[in-house]
Amino acid sequence: MTHLQDQRPEYTPADEPGPDALAGNDDSEALCEQVARAQAERATLRIVGGDTKAFYGRQVDAAQSLSTTGHHGIVHYDPVELVATVRAGTRLRDLERVLADNGQRLAFEPPHFGDNATVGGMVAAGLSGPRRPWVGAVRDFVLGVRVITAEGKLLRFGGEVMKNVAGYDLSRLMVGAQGTLGVLTEISFKVLPLPQARACLRFELPLAEALDRLTAWGREPLPITGAAHDGQTLHLRLEGGEGSVTATRQRLGGEAEEPLFWEQLREQRLPFFADALETSATLWRLSLPALARTPALEGDWLVDWAGAQRWLKGSEGRGVEGDPQADAHIHEAAIAVGGHATRFTPDASGASPFTPLAPVLAKYHRQLKNRLDPQSIFNPGRLYAEW
């Protein structure tokens, strides 16, 4: 069995953005031509950016690769209006550096999983970091997109302002769709200011007591933006105004720790994840209601998002490669407590890592796919074998 960390390079934050971060290159015409040609030839396309998240989802066997990395650059950035419009092939690290230079950030804290991570790949995967429960997910910050349709047309959905829409909000449907609905070429985001102050704390507490404290703290307006438990220690992050962070830190106590923990958690570089690689244990992510009981599954747990996201590694998570019953057991256990499970370790059998959809949801997903990509040109089978 191949583990996800075999397939992605080490991520190291950049000091300076690449030389083309602002000017970039508009390659949309060539991308449209490639899509139109694929449709005419009834070929399929594997959409590729930095390829740092190739482990996430099913393997795509396509006739051609369509690379977005030549389509890059920051199209428009207004720090006053807190809006940035970026081409999909732009390196995520370049965008974050430009934002940081202006005292701003992508608040949802997206993981990179490698230096070449792109903005388009970030949106297509839809993964958010430890701050997600307190500020929102990727989808909550997408204002609009430009997408190449199955006919090779470049269309715009949404814009650069937050507003209500009627019908499908196609810009947000692209988030987490893994490139199965169209080729993202441009995304507009809402960005937020960097916090004035930050404090990272640790408390030696068992999980049950840690969750009780987090439940009590969640009822108060505390500046918490990260809460994770590694089996022995509760890690807490505070961000906000100087006065609020200082007062909360004095009130809660705990020991100070370095912010590095949160970067390593976001990038899956903590010992918990490294051990999964060394022991060939399968890694699962369970998204659960924050107060849900821990499913009766054997293995080691790492709890994030104040209990709403739980990582499982161990013998029960390993199962037998290619055995659908091994995956089904994990999925059923997560569903039983009101959540869902995703296998983060690739399976050579090609089995879907995602929880099977309920019949009604599957029906609407198929209808949407058939409407936007009737010939299944884009990333066929990336989410589920039949799409």
Image (cartoon, rainbow, N blue to C red):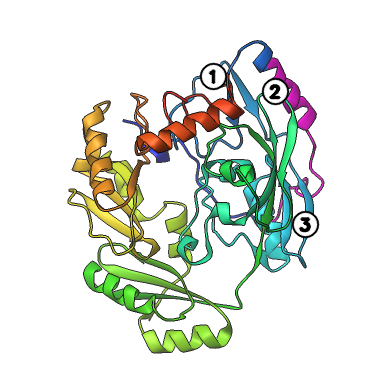
Q: Is residue 71 visible?
A: no
Secondary structure under the numbered disc 3 in the rendered image: strand
Marker disc for residue 366: none
The relative height of residue 309 versus residue 369 in the rendered view (above or below) is below
The quadrant in which the N terminus is found is: top left
Task: From the image, tell me which residue sits under label 2.
Answer: 151
Query: How busy is the neighbourhood of tag 2: few (under 14 within 10 Å), some, or many (20 plus)?
Result: some
Task: Specify the farthest residue to the front.
Answer: 166
Q: Is residue 63 visible?
A: yes
Q: Would residue 220 be found to the left or right of residue 12 on screen?
A: left
What is the x, y in percent for residue 230?
30, 62
The relative height of residue 4 versus residue 61 in the rendered view (above or below) is below
Q: Amino acid at mark 1?
A: Ala
Front residue (pair 83, 24): 83
Secondary structure under the numbered disc 1 in the rendered image: loop
| Closer mark to the observer between disc 2 and disc 3 | 2
Task: From the image, tell me which residue sits under label 3.
Answer: 77
Q: Would residue 196 be found to the left or right of residue 102 on screen?
A: left
Q: Earlier in the sequence, mark 2 or mark 1?
A: 1
Marker disc for residue 62: 1
Residue 283, by quadrant, is top left
Range of magenta residues: 16-37
